[in-house]
Image (cartoon, helix red, strand yellow):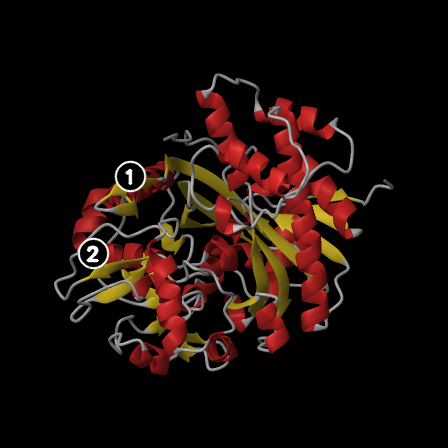
Amino acid sequence: MSNVPSTDIDGGLFAGSVFAAVDIGASSGRVILGRVSGRAGSDSAGAEGTAKLETVHRFPNRVVESDGGLRWNFDALFAEVLTGLTAAARTAAGRGETISSIGIDTWAVDYGLVNAAGDLIAQPFSYRDDRSRAAVARVHKKLDPARLYATTGLQFLQFNTIYQLATEKDLDGLQALLIPDLIAFLLTGQRRTESTNASTTGLFDAVAGEWATEFLAALGLPKKLFPPLIQPGETVGTLLPGIAARTGLAEATKVVAVGSHDTASAVAAVPAEHGNFAYISSGTWSLVGVELKKPVLTDASRQANFTNERGVDGTIRYLRNVGGLWLLSECQRTWAQQGYTATLDELLASAAALPFGGPQVNADDPYFIAPDNMPERIRAAVRNTGAVLTDNPAAITRCILDSLAAGYARTIADAERLADVPVDVVHIVGGGSQNRLLCQLTADATGKRVIAGPVEATALGNVLVQARAAGVVSGGLGELRALVRGSQPLESFQAALV
């Protein structure tokens, strides 16, 4: 945990509206104060509109072995959320500010089961648990994969919610709350399912924008297993009295639905100037795709394993999951245990010095999903290709980044072909945008200009949707993105001649 002192921002008190973003990824979480000023709908939004972020609390988030599987310690996670909201309330009050609302985004697909009394009956399983693998064949026996895709447009991943739910028993009287919705429920007492995250379940109609209730029936799942849908920008509810008392926030503080799937919030903050762009939300996972107005539900799209997920303002995030920096972070964890003490910057500098054309692996192979000795697993995967990779950390790091860049290039080329859209520029947002070697390798692999940043795209998208709901800014995604361009540092990379 780290709390930031109540100091002025940019040399003076920021006279804007204040919003709290709860932003939780698969390895860590933050509570962030967002201060938004200006009118994103005005012609001068890029010059006058501003959005600034201040992290007031950080906390780890890891899966644990518990009750026969890999689970999230949700009770500890929610306690950290409350600690963060308390820090946010204290920081804002110290500046004479009032927090207007709270928005929540997390990773997708995972859920907690809640009974009629509102009790969480068990700690939620993690998508990294292998329990759903055996359920895939059972689901496909009842619902043909082609039919599933034609309705949901969802990429096949063995941990999608539909397969996880197929392992559950005795669901009568229970509701499944996706992780951000579960947090919102515990804050407000209101049960809702935010639509961008609903679209990742495999039980959501990509065209109608509603639950695919016939799939629930076919799998013997309760018709009302999920709460009603809510859209980004709508109010979930206000804080329960006990939550307000514990955090120091006013009971009237709203919890506003944002793009609660963290990638939906990240894409909302991509600083694109026009529609011909691809995005890479680079973190633990890499989400690589383009933004569309309607889903692509062709069999060719299914065979290519692309997904059609909802974005903010009814857009479609047409993307494919590619492996991410989980591979590198797991390697670093193993190396640290073995006594290797080089910093990430030193590791990347050594990797950058290695020659072009080294070995690569399929970075999104399910073989890499679970933790445990990632360096050796990467070397084994290289051996399976007939190549050799030494145990030198720099060589393994270069292999990971070359593999990710190659995966990005393939995915973007596939998206252009399948969606029939040209891509002029690639935006990398999230933690991976700080990895200059990855950004340069991506420019080299794609042959396209790469713009890196903002790092905090997810939190920015979260805050900007709240600010628009509060009337502080106006306009569509184009106007919100102009505000991001005017507020955040960006770096451009051109393809090198190799």
Q: Secondary structure at mark 2?
A: loop
Residue situated furthest right in the rendering: 497
- Looking at the picture, tell me which residue is in the foreground, 219 or 477: 219
The x, y position of residue 317, in whole percent, is 57, 65
**Tag in front: 1 or 2:** 1
The x, y position of residue 17, in whole percent, is 45, 51
Residue linked to disc 1: 83
- Looking at the picture, tell me which residue is in the foreground, 199 or 140: 140
Q: Secondary structure at mark 1?
A: helix
Q: Amino acid at mark 1?
A: Thr
Q: Quadrant of the C terminus?
A: top right
| Residue 58 can be seen in this image | yes
- Looking at the picture, tell me which residue is in the foreground, 10 or 434: 434
**Is 21 drawn above or below residue 277 in the view shown?**
above
Question: Residue 181 sits in which quadrant?
Answer: bottom left
CB under 8 Å between callouts 1 and 2? no
Q: Amino acid at mark 2?
A: Leu
- Looking at the picture, tell me which residue is in the foreground, 288 or 470: 288
Distance from the alpha carbon under mark 1 to that under mark 2: 16 Å
**Is 26 drawn above or below residue 228 in the view shown?**
above
Residue linked to disc 2: 240
Quick check: 298 left or right of 449?
A: left
Q: Quick one: label 2, few (<14), some, or many (20+) residues within 10 Å?
A: some
